[in-house]
Amino acid sequence: MPHTLPAGLRPGGRFDTWRRPTAGYVVADVDGTLILEGSTATPGVAAAVADATAAGLRVGFATGRLPAGLRDLHDQLRVPGPHIVHNGAQVREAGLPIHTWSLDRPVASALVDWCVARGLYAEFYLGEEFVVTERQPAAQTFWDLISGDPHGVVGDIDWRSADVIKATVVAYQGRGADTLLAGLRALGLTAETSTSPVFPGDQFINVTSPQADKGRAVRWAAGYLGIGIENVVAVGDGPNDLSMLTVAGTAIAMGQAPAVVQQAAHLVVPEVAADGVAHALAAAASWLA
């Protein structure tokens, strides 16, 4: 067991099983980890990313967002990835997809019908575009801050030939989230909740193929880079980060993360408002040798 930790890090729930790695790839959640509000990181986090990449680390994002929702962050940080988007349903590098786990078409069609029948607001991501169950005024803030306007509604699509990468079902102020999770999982899909400091109280249910989650995508990205999973550092704050925290050799939780996430992590850094991820990046750079 290590006896000392870099500045800003403290033990998490799995600290006793952790061994100091030779870090090669740091993958960080976006909302609540790299970003507190808006669409870019703070200067302190941006500087930490630049220092980590200059030291020789590969740095990537792992997010439920669609690629369009990362443009400002990507332009700011200028890291090629690999990046994990759509909550683990796609891995991208240098702006292009390199692996995708799409939903089976009959299942995707059934999911659309399920959402429409319940009057739910949901977004369905097809390639670089997305459509919605309906153009709800309540969703305009999401579009303005993250995704841009939708390209249509579900009735515009022939679902027999559409490839759906991911869907997001919104539980405004968390209402009915547990029931929605159970229903979506009953359809044979992976369904995980995430939150954003930008939209306090709302829960975003990421719906993907049963073969897709952040953990599987992190493992695939590490193999693509030729890096052992034991040399991957994953940083996150939400329940949808648990799958990657479980597989990474070093799992780091943000200070504001719920207890279940901190218990799943080897280490904990300060909260997002205190640039906690910058401490994780600095530590990972110190573990290169």
Image (cartoon, rainbow, N blue to C red):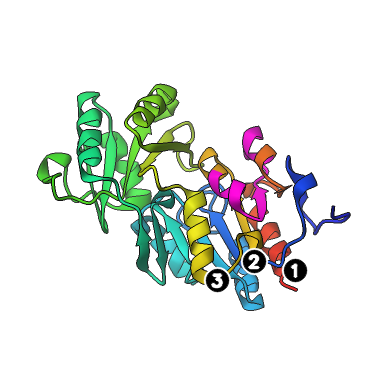
Q: Going from the N terminus, do you reach mark 2 or mark 1 first?
A: 2
In the image, residue 253 lies in the stretch drawn in magenta: yes
For image coordinates 36% across by 37% down, the residue present is 189
Q: Amino acid at mark 3?
A: Gly
Q: What span is in magenta?
A: 243-262
Report crowding for label 3: few under 14, some 14 to 19, many 20 or more residues within 10 A (C-alpha): few
- Element type where label 1 sits in the image: helix
Label 2 – label 1 distance at C-alpha: 12 Å
Q: Picture coordinates of residue 235 (x, y %)?
A: 61, 52
Q: Is 59 on the left-hand or right-hand side of 160?
A: right
The one of 67 and 265 positioned closer to us in this rendering: 265
In the image, residue 252 lies in the stretch drawn in magenta: yes
Q: Which residue is mark 1?
A: 286
Q: Which residue is mark 2?
A: 48
Q: Amino acid at mark 1?
A: Ser
Q: Picture coordinates of residue 178 (x, y %)?
A: 44, 24
Report crowding for label 2: few under 14, some 14 to 19, many 20 or more residues within 10 A (C-alpha): many
- Element type where label 2 sits in the image: helix
Q: Is 115 on the left-hand or right-hand side of 236?
A: left
Q: Going from the N terminus, do you reach mark 1 or mark 3 first?
A: 3
Residue contact between numbered discs 2 and 3, judged by CB atoms under 8 Å: no
For image coordinates 70% across by 58% down, the residue present is 279
Label 2 – label 3 distance at C-alpha: 24 Å
Q: Which residue is mark 3?
A: 226
Disc 1 versus disc 3: nearer the observer: 3
Residue 275 visible here: no
Q: Going from the N terminus, do you reach mark 2 or mark 3 first?
A: 2
Q: Picture coordinates of residue 25 (x, y %)?
A: 59, 66
